[in-house]
Image (cartoon, rainbow, N blue to C red):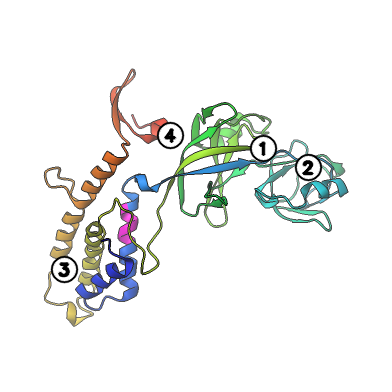
């Protein structure tokens, strides 16, 4: 039976004198984070959806140069009121040939549309506009379309309109600035470029060419993994309880070694030596005596193979993983 979060940190508290419950919980999750980061685990692979809304361009805006507020006319107000999936603040707007502006707020009563930066185009009391989605964050998951909170990277994105996967993912945004500085290409997207990060540090991407039709893009992505928070939380099935305990104990030994002079209860034990033993049990590169982490990697590889040796006409034989199949640059 799998250990619960409470059983994990309680074992640490019983083994290491003077270790606080706060520190014990922290060490358990620190160990878990290291394990998450050690491999692209199959249980952290997930599927979601990116949604592109249809272009809206009816009506016009009163645009004032160097102001970050544009005022919609009555027709535009009607077209922009009550937008969902996504909300208007998750879409972008362009006036003429301007780069996309992010929308931070919209008042349907006054027609005031607040932008993330001042308008640089010439003032125009009846400016045409294009409202669509140029930038995308983490995918939506579940029936209700909730944005994932532990997004790491995209593995693949599929475009049903052309029955093809994106050719490249996570390309540098500066490259797109050179290829299409005015963002004049509107069609079926086949590339994903980095754009920026949100205020919370969530990565934001730009599809290219820009999609202006209502469309859904099924995607596969890698999650970072979530920490244990509730006392009843348990580990993913592929991870052995002892694996996390050995890693957490390794860190706890390091804590004890640093606090021997502070707490008399910690004296009389060679915490450095104990830490080395826990470290070897946790991870040991020696193939003849692998650690629990290496054994977990093996089990996960058997369940969900990620690496295989193939022939390459240019470099003879190399190991190819998920990066090659999903648009990442390979290491020679």
Magenta residues (range):
30-35
Q: Position of residue 72 (x, y in %)?
A: 83, 49
Q: Is disc 4 placed on a helix, strand or loop?
A: loop
Residue plotted at (68% across, 35% down): 213
Q: Which residue is mark 1?
A: 214
- Secondary structure under tag 3 reads helix
Identify the secondary structure beneath mark 1.
Answer: loop
The reply to whether the C-beta atoms of the residues labelled 4 and 1 are less than 8 Å apart is: no
Mark 2 and mark 3: Cα distance apart in space: 66 Å
Whether residue 64 is visible, yes or no, is no
Q: Main secondary structure of the magenta part?
A: helix
* Residue 121 disc label: 2
Q: Earlier in the sequence, mark 4 or mark 1?
A: 1
Q: Residue 328 lies in what quarter of the image?
A: top left
Q: Quadrant of the N terminus?
A: bottom left
* Label 2 SS: loop
Q: Which residue is mark 3?
A: 271
Q: Nearer the viewer, residue 159 or 36?
A: 159
From the image, which quarter does the C terminus lie in? top left
Q: Which residue is depicted at the point 37% across and 63% down?
A: 228
Task: Give the distance between the C-alpha atoms of the residues marked 4 and 3, in whole angstroms.
Answer: 43 Å
Q: Badge 3: how crowded within 10 Å, few (<14), some, or many (20+)?
A: many
Label count reads 4
Which residue position holds label 4? 328
Mark toward the viewer: 1 or 3: 1
Q: Residue 301's x, y, as percent?
A: 28, 40
- In three-dimensional space, the C-alpha distance between marks 1 and 2, rounded to whole angstroms, equals 28 Å
């Amino acid at each position: 039976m799998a250990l619960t979060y409470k059983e994990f940190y309680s074992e640490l508290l019983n083994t290491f004198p003077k270790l606080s419950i706060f520190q014990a919980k922290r060490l358990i999750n620190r160990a878990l984070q290291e394990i998450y980061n050690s491999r692209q685990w199959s249980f952290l692979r997930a599927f979601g959806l990116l949604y592109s809304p249809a272009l809206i361009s009816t009506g016009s805006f009163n645009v004032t140069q160097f102001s970050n507020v544009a005022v919609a006319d009555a027709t535009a107000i009607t077209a922009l009121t009550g937008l969902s999936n996504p909300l208007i603040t998750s879409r972008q707007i362009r006036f003429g040939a301007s780069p996309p502006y992010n929308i931070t707020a919209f008042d349907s009563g006054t027609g005031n549309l607040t932008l993330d930066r001042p308008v640089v185009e010439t003032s125009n009391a009846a400016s045409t506009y294009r409202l669509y989605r140029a930038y995308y964050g983490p995918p939506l998951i579940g029936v209700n379309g909730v944005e994932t909170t532990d997004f790491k990277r995209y593995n693949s994105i599929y475009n049903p309109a052309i029955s093809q996967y994106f050719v490249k993912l996570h390309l540098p945004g500066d490259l797109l600035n050179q290829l299409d500085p005015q963002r004049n290409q509107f069609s079926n997207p086949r590339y994903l470029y980095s754009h920026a990060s949100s205020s919370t540090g969530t990565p934001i991407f730009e599809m290219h060419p820009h999609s202006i039709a209502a469309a859904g893009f099924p995607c596969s992505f890698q999650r970072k993994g979530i920490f244990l928070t509730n006392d009843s939380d348990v580990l993913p099935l592929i991870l052995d309880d002892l694996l996390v305990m050995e890693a957490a104990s390794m860190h706890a030994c390091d804590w004890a070694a640093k606090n021997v002079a502070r707490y008399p209860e910690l004296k009389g034990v060679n915490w450095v030596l104990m830490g080395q033993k826990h470290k070897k049990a946790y991870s040991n590169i020696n193939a003849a005596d692998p650690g629990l982490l290496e054994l977990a990697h093996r089990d996960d590889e058997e369940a969900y193979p990620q690496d295989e040796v193939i022939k390459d006409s240019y470099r003879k034989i190399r190991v190819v993983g998920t990066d090659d199949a999903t648009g990442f640059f390979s290491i020679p």
